[in-house]
Image: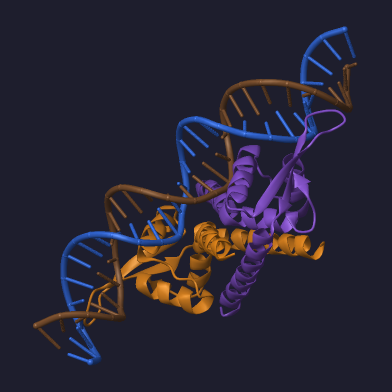
Chain colours: A orange, B purple, C blue, D brown
Amino acid sequence: MLYTCIVNEEFILKWKSQVKKGTLAFIILSVLEGHEYYGYELIEAVKKFTAIEIAEGTLYPLMNRLKKEGLVSSKWVEQESGIPRKYYVLSNAGKKSLHEMTVYWNDLGVAINKISKSK
Amino acid sequence: MLYTCIVNEEFILKWKSQVKKGTLAFIILSVLEGHEYYGYELIEAVKKFTAIEIAEGTLYPLMNRLKKEGLVSSKWVEQESGIPRKYYVLSNAGKKSLHEMTVYWNDLGVAINKISKSK
DNA sequence: ACAAAATACATAGTAATGCAATGTATTGAT
DNA sequence: ATCAATACATTGCATTACTATGTATTTTGT
């Protein structure tokens, strides 16, 4: 039984990591809607909103992908003290993609609820 | 603008594929709760419930993983005619994992809703 | 009767992505 | 003076969905 629990924990941990693949981009774009954030701040914001902890090694490559895809743009902002911050802004293409993602996400939620309720 | 649309479509397609990574295991376990299915039937069932089409090359390795993890068991059932079917049954560990996954999934949904509504 | 599609299993290789590890640099707290 | 926090970034690994391919049987259309 103990063994089963450990196996389960490992499975669940891996599973949560896999769920992030996909949802993270969606969450980031959602957070950026109507509000600019810089990278480090995004990690804090997502943690606050969703209790999901994004590793820095996850966020920065992700933001570069989103930039490359044209969904966000970025701008450096000098600080009076400390390291300059790179702020990310949702583009029009980003807003459009976010809308499509929201529809898909909601449909998926409805579908999964339907499965559970059919039992 | 056309170019942007095409880029968006590709991005969205990839994104949906990524969302499946993780949700598929959850969906499969949900479908198996209280009902046995064989592989090919599972693909049909998921398609009916969620409009998600699972490739066979996705399902069979996934079922083997779930079996290896002890979340499902399988049994061959001979048919009066045709190829024998491999039925999958949710194990106790599978039920437990499914429960944990459901909690995480619901929390995630609530969190994402919260983000959208805060704008 | 014969061809095509559907049923039913499976594997190999590729592409995509989260994460640990590592690195640089500044600031504030003990 | 050292450690934690802030703030950026890259490299390599592990995981997993999907395409392509393969085998074999049954049903459907012409």
Residue A95 at least partly seen: no
In front: A32, or D6? D6
Percent from the top left, x then y, of residue A72?
A: 44, 62
Residue C28 image-quadrant placement: bottom left
Asked if B8 appears above or below A108 in the picture, the reply is: above
Percent from the top left, x then y, of residue C11?
A: 55, 32
Quadrant containing the C terminus of chain B is bottom right
Residue D1 image-quadrant placement: bottom left
Percent from the top left, x then y, of residue A105?
A: 64, 62
Asked if A85 appears above or below A108 in the picture, the reply is: below
In front: B76, or D18? B76
Name the residue at 61% across, 46% down.
Answer: B62
Asked if D21 appears above or below B76 in the picture, the reply is: above
In the image, taking residue A116 as reference, residue D16 lies left or right, namely left
Percent from the top left, x then y, of residue C6?
A: 80, 32
Name the residue at 22% across, 82% down.
Answer: A80
Residue B20 at least partly seen: yes
Residue C1 image-quadrant placement: top right
Asked if D2 appears above or below A109 in the picture, the reply is: below
Label tally:
0
In front: A7, or B111? A7
In the image, taking residue A52 as reference, residue D25 lies left or right, namely right
In the image, taking residue A66 as reference, residue A78 lies left or right, namely left
Name the residue at 56% across, 60% down.
Answer: A96
In the image, taking residue C24 as reference, residue B114 lies left or right, namely right
